Amino acid sequence: MAEAAPQTSPDTELLHAIARGDESALAALYDRYNSILLGLLLRILHSRVEAEDVLQEVFLQIWQRAANFDETRGRAFTWMVTLARSRAIDRLRSLQSRQRADDTALRDAPDSGVGDAVEDVYHGEQREIVRAALAEIPEEQRRALLLAYFEGLTQAEIAERLGQPLGTVKTRMRSGMSKLRDLLGGKMGRGAGLNF
């Protein structure tokens, strides 16, 4: 008694027809599996737009590679799911890579270019003016102001650090600020003011 040939599945027959260039076979396969594959792609990509785009790529790949399908290695459906999953993971990696590149570009980009250069020069000049004025006030006043505005210490912390009474520190800071205002006068430019 002769052994019966293994029966080919309808999906496999469709893939063989697609391999021969039968567009109606591709349409039939699409009608049968597009919603299932779209669901899989949505679970991976979390974006309907991306999932629909990848779904089109998957069916294009099926059209181009149907001849590569080997029914002895597995079912047609499993082959299509593997293609879809692989395409989705590739897209996900691409999107993540693009996002990392965008984040890096934003982080590394200069804020605004030429305007910043002019502003940097202006602030640099102001720093020099303030530094020169600070050099002209007495050491005790300068030290108290520097501890307050550049190290962020409170008046009580400054008193403790310098081993001086709190009242003395307050007086020195008040006197130092007054002298700085007098020294700087109009040198800082309109509206710059001292924000100590």
Image: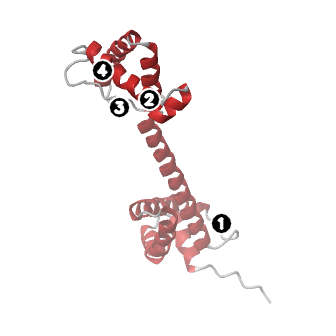
Residue farthest left in this picture:
190
- Residue type, label 2: Ala
- Residue type, label 3: Asp
- Residue type, label 1: Asp
Give the label, 3 or 4, closer to the camera.
4
Q: Find numbered disc 2 in the image and state the secondary structure of the residue it sits on.
A: helix
Residue linked to disc 3:
111
Residue linked to disc 2:
148
Q: Verify CB contact (< 8 Å) between mark 4 and mark 2.
A: no
Q: Find numbered disc 3 in the image and state the secondary structure of the residue it sits on.
A: loop
Of the numbered discs 4 and 1, the one sitting upstream in the chain is 1
Disc 4 to disc 1, C-alpha distance: 89 Å
Of the numbered discs 3 and 1, the one sitting upstream in the chain is 1
Give the label, 3 or 2, closer to the camera.
2
Disc 3 to disc 1, C-alpha distance: 56 Å
Disc 3 to disc 4, C-alpha distance: 36 Å
In percent of width and height, residue 124 lies at 36, 17
Q: Find numbered disc 1 in the image and state the secondary structure of the residue it sits on.
A: loop
Give the label, 1 or 2, closer to the camera.
2
- Residue in the picture at 50% in, 70% down: 37
Q: Verify CB contact (< 8 Å) between mark 3 and mark 4.
A: no
Q: Residues within 10 Å of mark 3 (few under 14, many from 20)?
A: few
- Residue in the picture at 65% in, 82% down: 7
Residue 82 vertical position relative to residue 141 in the rendered view, above or below? below
Disc 3 to disc 2, C-alpha distance: 30 Å
